[in-house]
Amino acid sequence: MTGERRFVAAVDLGASGGRVMVGDLGAGRLGLREAHRFANRPVSAGGTIYWDVLWLYSQVLDGLRLAASAFPLSGVGIDSWGVDFGLLDAGGALLGNPVHYRDGRTAGMREHLHELIGASELYERTGIAQLPINTICQLASAARTPPLAVADKLLLMPDLLGYWLAGSVGAEVTNASTTELLDVRKRTWATGVIERVGLPASLFPPLRQPGSVIGPLLPDVIAETGLDAGTPLVAVASHDTASAVAAVPAEGHGFCYISCGTWSLVGVELDRPVLTEASRLAQFTNETGIEGTVRYLRNVMGLWPLQESLRTWSAAGLSLRLSTLLDQAASAAPLRSVIDTDDLVFLPPGDMPGRIAAACSLTGQPVPSSPAEIVRCVLDSLALAHWRAVDQVQRLSGQAVDVVHLVGGGSRNELLCQLTADACGLPVLAGPAEATALGNVLVQARALGAAPGDLAGLRALVRDTQPLRRFEPGGHASGWRAAADRLGS
């Protein structure tokens, strides 16, 4: 690591919005500045939910242009959510907009796949929780459609945008691990699985490791953004959770992380995967991290029910400030009503407050009657889900936890942080809120010689430079157990 001050651009794309952030690094220095922030709005057309990928790309270019106008950038890296993809033909043209993982096209595909390859065998090979949103299910649903029939290569979302920036086809391994098509032990494409589900192995591009330099940005990108010729695109840990976990400010190994945004990813960091039948049945996943680590985690429905409730109220003409709702929710009766956030009824967009009310009624609990009561129900339920996942991950992995690191946008929600500490009976260290962007910055800066050379050094830099808050648990364990009992968990 050099002491020279360097700037890099982190393109960080989430399911509800994206941003281009500028990392500012030097000796003992790690800063983050926002260059551009934009919405990520899916589009429904003809009964299918799509990502507006050309809009996203245009916003990435706008963000890089704004960043380059203010800072001398040394590199660019991209991270995004997992599982979704675009298909290219043999000439490199995109064959239609990528389909959103919340689209209904995967209905029944999991059962179909398990007829081709048994659930236990599939988990033993890939180590991935068998969810309907996974790439393997999306591909099974599209097997007989024209785009897949003529496709030459599949590119996951950060790799697709990277292809347009630098012209190189590849698949970064942390994101590739979310597809349920990667061999969890060998960290290569699981060609046997691919072929048994009726897909050509040639569809999947060469794998890249986080920290590898993909290549210089294309001339048209340089002209569009004003970046210096030769500016490299770096393969970061391109799955957003992998980037977030890289920036968890932990010491040692006795920690659990919760990367909380639209989803909450709750897990521990391991040296090897956990491939037991109990792990499969609990829907834990073994995703790839940096430096050969395994992100052993469970997907929990995160702030999505809150986000979608806010959208529903806004569409109905209600002007509600989240800060006011959170203050009111903090004063509402605790654990009055809870929902199972993992219930698939909460997965699609729509009238979330109505679904929450119906779920409470169905389980014989008081029905939340005001927005503040719904917010409290959602946050109590999310904290309860966090507790269940933290408890499970310790039992299934054999790794004890003495602290929970809650990173991402959810770390700004003080009520959620305190409820999580209360539910788990463990201290919660909250922050950094921009963990994903920081992890993106750190991995590419390390590749360029501008950050510490190992994961422990990267995390120490985060601890030393980023504001963190500590939440101690309260003494209400019996109340949380009783709430879990209401849901049969």
Image: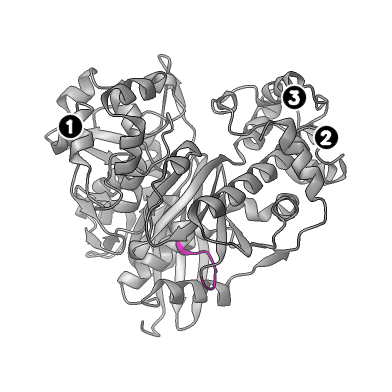
Q: CA distance from mark 2 to mark 3?
A: 10 Å
Indicate the secondary structure of the residue bearing disc 2. loop
Residue for point 81% across, 44% down: 479
Residue for point 49% across, 40% down: 15
Give the number of the disc on residue 104: none
Q: Amino acid at mark 2?
A: Arg
In the rendered image, residue 280 lying in the magenta stretch gets the answer: no
Indicate the secondary structure of the residue bearing disc 1. helix
Tell me whether circle 1 and circle 2 mark residues in contact (CB < 8 Å).
no
What residue does disc 1 label?
Answer: 195
Q: Pick whichever of labels 2 and 3 is earlier in the sequence.
A: 2
Q: Position of residue 47 (x, y in %)?
A: 43, 15
What residue does disc 2 label?
Answer: 336
Residue for point 30% across, 58% down: 235
Q: Position of residue 388 (x, y in %)?
A: 63, 45
Q: Position of residue 192 (x, y in %)?
A: 18, 37
Toward the viewer: 59 or 482? 482
Start-end of magenta stretch: 246-252
Q: Pick whichever of labels 1 and 2 is earlier in the sequence.
A: 1
Toward the viewer: 265 or 150? 265
Q: CA distance from mark 3 to mark 1?
A: 44 Å
Q: Amino acid at mark 3?
A: Cys
Indicate the secondary structure of the residue bearing disc 3. helix
Q: Amino acid at mark 1?
A: Glu
| Residue 271 falls left or right of residue 203 | right
Above or below, comparing residue 110 to residue 327 in the picture: above
Q: Position of residue 46 (x, y in %)?
A: 40, 14
Magenta stretch: dominant secondary structure = loop
Q: Pick whichever of labels 3 and 1 is earlier in the sequence.
A: 1
- Name the image quarter holding residue 95: top left
What residue does disc 3 label?
Answer: 360
